Amino acid sequence: MALEHRFIETNGVRLHCAVAGAGPLVIFLHGFPECWYSWRHQLEALAPYFRVVAPDLRGYGDSDKPAGIAAYTMPHLIADIEGLIQALGEHQTILVGHDWGGGLAWYFATERPTLTRQLVVMNCPHPAIFQQHLMTNRQQLRQSWYLFFFQIPWLPETLLGLNHAWLIGKAIRQSAVQKSAITEADIAYLRDAASKPGALHSGINYYRAVFRSPESLANLPDGVWRFVYGREPRPPARRTLEDWPQISAPTLVIWGEQDIALDKALTLGMEPLFKAPFRVQYVPDSGHWVQQEKAQLVNDALLEFLAR
């Protein structure tokens, strides 16, 4: 596979992208605290049949790292991907996301349905389901402790960055079930990416931005909303699954069942969120890093699904 590394301008930022192949466009969106390299196995498997593009999302790797929490809100992230599609000369894309990239993929498919040909999400719950579980599932709330820790200024990125992001490597290694699938060289690459100036700060700003977004706070009492946002229009509260726009793209969810942070229950009851074919493929012997831990299985599932 001839993998090309190039920079693409989109939405006022410059994204580093790994690009290969020809055919229908597939964009891969990585999670925290990773980079394009997390998709190395999938790029190789799909490049003979598709035009594959794996960007370092804004704030990560060699991509631009705008200052401030506000630069990492969902509208900016969605606009980055929309601009990337346009810069590549395409009108729509197959979108594949994992972890935070999966969250972006869910929102993109919801907000930009005409640009989303097919959708694949790995080990990231739909935001509607996640919101419900954080309010009602104490076990999931405990497992999501890091979301609240990341709201502390500067401390999380400082600790995670110590000793060339040693804790990042340790966390990936310990949370993987198929440990031999992620080599020491792979860990070293991911630690290098996390250690680039500003990368951890920007990556954690994703979590800070989502906690401060109007959509996340739409259920606040009127007095609190006016104190925080003044006269800014309040977005409609989404209290039930039926309050969310349905996804019109055929969707596949791939889920490593031994994820230590995200419970399998987050994949249940999703049917009202779709008006196109949707299914979940469980991977019982994988943790959170499913596309790396079970690369061949994931590649086979992708090729089978995208051939439809």
Image (spheres, grey):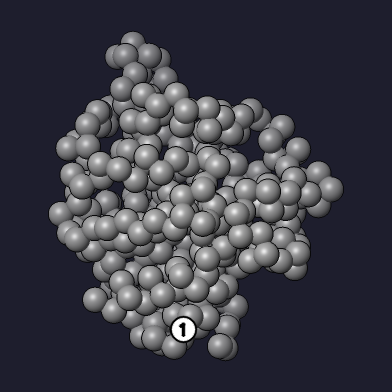
| Neighbours of disc 1 within 10 Å: few (<14), some (14-19), many (20+) | many
**SS class, disc 1:** loop
Q: Quadrant of residue 183?
A: bottom right
Residue 271, given in percent of the width and then of the height, sits at: 20, 47
- Observer able to see residue 58: no
Tell me which residue sits at (81%, 52%) in the image.
164
Looking at the image, the residue that sits furthest to the right is 163
Tell me which residue sits at (37%, 77%) in the image.
303
Tell me which residue sits at (41%, 75%) in the image.
300
Tell me: 231 left or right of 201: left
Tell me which residue sits at (41%, 44%) in the image.
264
**Mark count:** 1
- Observer able to see residue 142: yes
Q: Quadrant of residue 179?
A: bottom right
Of the 4 image quadrants, the one containing the C terminus is bottom left
Up-down: is 232 above or below 190? above
Q: Nearer the viewer, residue 110 or 287?
A: 287
Residue 21, given in percent of the width and then of the height, sits at: 46, 86
Looking at the image, the residue that sits furthest to the top is 223
Mark 1: amino acid: Ala
Up-down: is 129 above or below 134? below
Of the 4 image quadrants, the one containing the N terminus is bottom right
Q: Nearer the viewer, residue 218 or 233?
A: 218
Residue 66, given in percent of the width and then of the height, sits at: 58, 50
Q: Nearer the viewer, residue 66 or 181?
A: 181
Residue 132, given in percent of the width and then of the height, sits at: 33, 30
Q: Which residue is mark 1?
A: 47
